Amino acid sequence: MNSFDLLIFDCDGVVVDSEVIACRCLADILGRYGAPVDVDETLDRFLGRSSSAVREYFLARTGKPLPDSFHSDLLQQLEQSFRGSLKLMPHVRTVLDAIDRPYCLASSSDPDRVQMTLAVTHLADYFCDRVYTAAMVAHGKPAPDIFLYAAAQMGVEASGALVIEDSVNGVLAGKAAGMTVWGFIGGSHYSGRDGARLLSAAGADRIFGSLAELVAN
């Protein structure tokens, strides 16, 4: 990591092992609202995407806009599930404690979900005001907007940033931003899935399975 001026971490699936839990919650709520989808399809369709992708899917599936109550219902179920089951990704505190250069968080999730996630896992103090979400930019991943915005806010050129991402859409976004991207496949959502192939095909510059590798000598 020593050759980079800035480290940009994705949130879900990188610092917290949340993707499977979140996709189960999303599939459940979509089903209740009349747009059933199974967990595997939810992973394939929405991993690394912002809430706009869910709105587009719901409209195409039902012919109706996503109800106003959908977001609050999903957030409530996520919080209940996260408080009972969410775990930090192994070694994440060790890595964050060891970083000797600027770092931040850039997520496709809505701001209230990110803040809830960081509060539940007691990671908020690690990132403070260095949290950037798709709500701050015009286009979510796989567009490069969120990563370019994060680098600009941190005062770093895109070419000097390293992105840690677990999703195809996130890798595509980081590469489109002109950044180096390392694909992380240590999350439980890659159990039984060929994450290395998926992220390599998307353009990841390196694939790794443990955050401990970021600080290994």
Image (tube, helix red, strand yellow):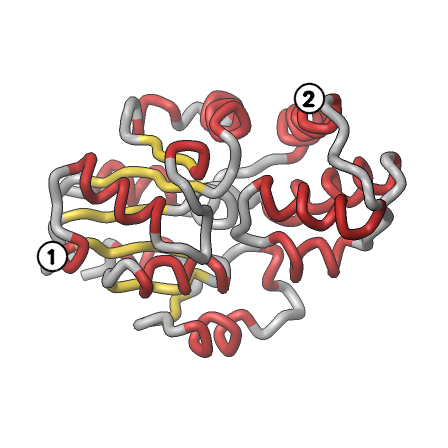
Please say whether residue 84 is visible from this viewpoint: no
**Which residue lies at the image location 58% right of the left edge and 54% below the top edge?**
47
Give the residue number, with chain letter if any, for mark 2.
Answer: 72
* Residue situated in front as seen by the camera: 85 or 39: 39
Q: Residues within 10 Å of mark 1 (few under 14, many from 20)?
A: few
Disc 1 target residue: 2
Q: Secondary structure at mark 1?
A: loop
- Observer-nearest residue: 34 or 197? 34
Q: Is residue 148 visible?
A: yes
Q: Are marks 2 and 1 in contact (CB under 8 Å)?
A: no
Q: Residue furthest front?
A: 63
x and y, in percent, of residue 84 in the image: 68, 28
- The reply, left or right, for residue 55 in relation to residue 122 is right
**Across the whole image, how many numbered discs are drawn on residues?**
2
Residue located 35% across and 34% down the image: 132
Q: Which mark sits nearer the N-terminus, 2 or 1?
A: 1
Image-quadrant location for residue 156: top left
Q: Is residue 54 above or below residue 192?
A: above
SS category of the residue bearing label 2: helix
| 20 relative to 196 in the view: left or right | right
Q: Quadrant of residue 94?
A: top left
- Against 58, residue 75 (above or below) is above
**Can you say which quadrant of the picture contains the C terminus?**
bottom left
Q: Position of residue 5 (x, y in %)?
A: 11, 50
Residue type at mark 1?
Answer: Asn
On the image, the x and y values in percent for residue 172 come to: 41, 64
Query: In the image, what residue occupies the spot 32% across and 65% down?
Result: 175
Using the image as rendered, state which of residue 163 and residue 138 is in the foreground: 138
Question: What is the CA distance from the residue labelled 2 to the residue labelled 1?
Answer: 41 Å
User: Within 10 angstroms of label 2, few (less than 14), some, or many (20 or more) residues?
Assistant: few
Measuring from the top left, give residue 187's x and y in whole percent.
54, 55
